[in-house]
Amino acid sequence: MEMTLFSGSANIQMAQSVARNLGIELGRRVLERFPDSEVHAEIADSVRGHDVYLIQPTSPPSNEHLMELLLLADACRRAGAERLTAVIPYFGYARQDRRASGRDAVGARLVADLIKSASIGRVLAIDLHASALEGFFSVPLEHLSAVSLLAEAAKPLLPPQAVVVAPDLGAAKLARRYAKLLNLPMAIVHKSRVGGERVETHGIVGDVRDRSLVIVDDMISTGATIEAAFNASTANGSLPIGVVVSSHGLFVGNAAQRLSALPIKQFLVTDSIAPPKSSLPVRSVSLGDLIGEAIKRIHANESLSELLIHE
């Protein structure tokens, strides 16, 4: 079965990196917006009987990028694709995984159902906000991690006296994985969210005194969580300098303004999301080899065990 790779518009540069790893060209497609803002998708290559991979993070603007993915999938299905896999390095709506007030939507489950309705047979994602999201999908989900790539890239930036900091309880498992790879102690900040861009901290478990900070999380969104963790750590005696490591760098809202006020040496992220245009010291680590290797193994029906997250 022949392999074909298509990309939406969310992150063409990353898709090209994956294509280079696979030694193929991206498939031709047309994506356009009608005057009434509707998205139109059309593929320009034959995919009849092919094993098709659609690369599209559902990053901001999330709704547009999600619709591109669904429409491209539908176009491939109607053109006779034998197998469809959605490669979603950043999965938007992941934080809407439960009802917080009892009358709100569970957006993550709805998006998972939409993906199935588009005849996508498998999903490949990187460092989901919560591993439990796998239970939302009725199609197989391959959950890969960029933690080892990011940890390796972070090593040259860290002094011996450093501490891995989880900015909230939800990031504790993630911080433990980084701490093990970097051979560093860890600490956990107790945090509560009081609004879309406001958080409060209630103390730290672990010793940060006289240590530089390695703040880790699955994503950097508005920067409020990073700011709160940094301030809580310095208030408990840490050195006023650090590195932030995150799989997904959204940097939305007032993130640039908020984070530029902190003495952060480097923001280390992957290229799951197209890099932001800002003055922040952001360094991007390529996912091209990781995703390319996963696609090779899926295409050849080989094991992904070494690449998957096991918690």
Image (cartoon, rainbow, N blue to C red):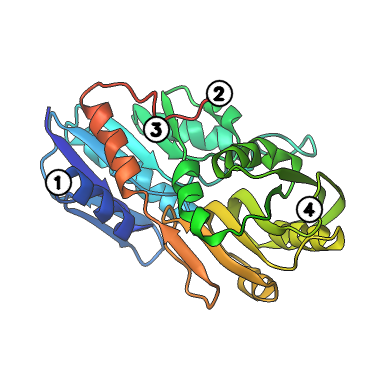
The residue under label 2 is 135
Callout in the foreground (2, 4) = 4
Instruction: Estimate the x, y position of residue 125 in percent, counting from the top left.
Output: 44, 38
Callout in the foreground (4, 3) = 4
Q: Are marks 2 and 1 in contact (CB under 8 Å)?
A: no
Mark 3 residue element = strand
The residue under label 4 is 208
Distance CA(mark 4)–CA(mark 3): 39 Å
Instruction: Estimate the x, y position of residue 295 in percent, counting from the top left.
Output: 27, 35
Q: Amino acid at mark 1?
A: Gly
Q: Would you say residue 33 is visible in this rendering?
A: yes
Distance CA(mark 2)–CA(mark 1): 34 Å
Nearer the N terminus, badge 3 or badge 2?
A: 3
Q: Residues within 10 Å of mark 3 (few under 14, many from 20)?
A: many
Q: Residues within 10 Å of mark 4 (few under 14, many from 20)?
A: many
Nearer the N terminus, badge 2 or badge 1?
A: 1
Instruction: Estimate the x, y position of residue 181 in percent, counting from the top left.
Output: 54, 40
Nearer the N terminus, badge 4 or badge 3?
A: 3
Drawn side of residue 66 relative to residue 47, left or right: right
Q: Amino acid at mark 3?
A: Val
The residue under label 1 is 23
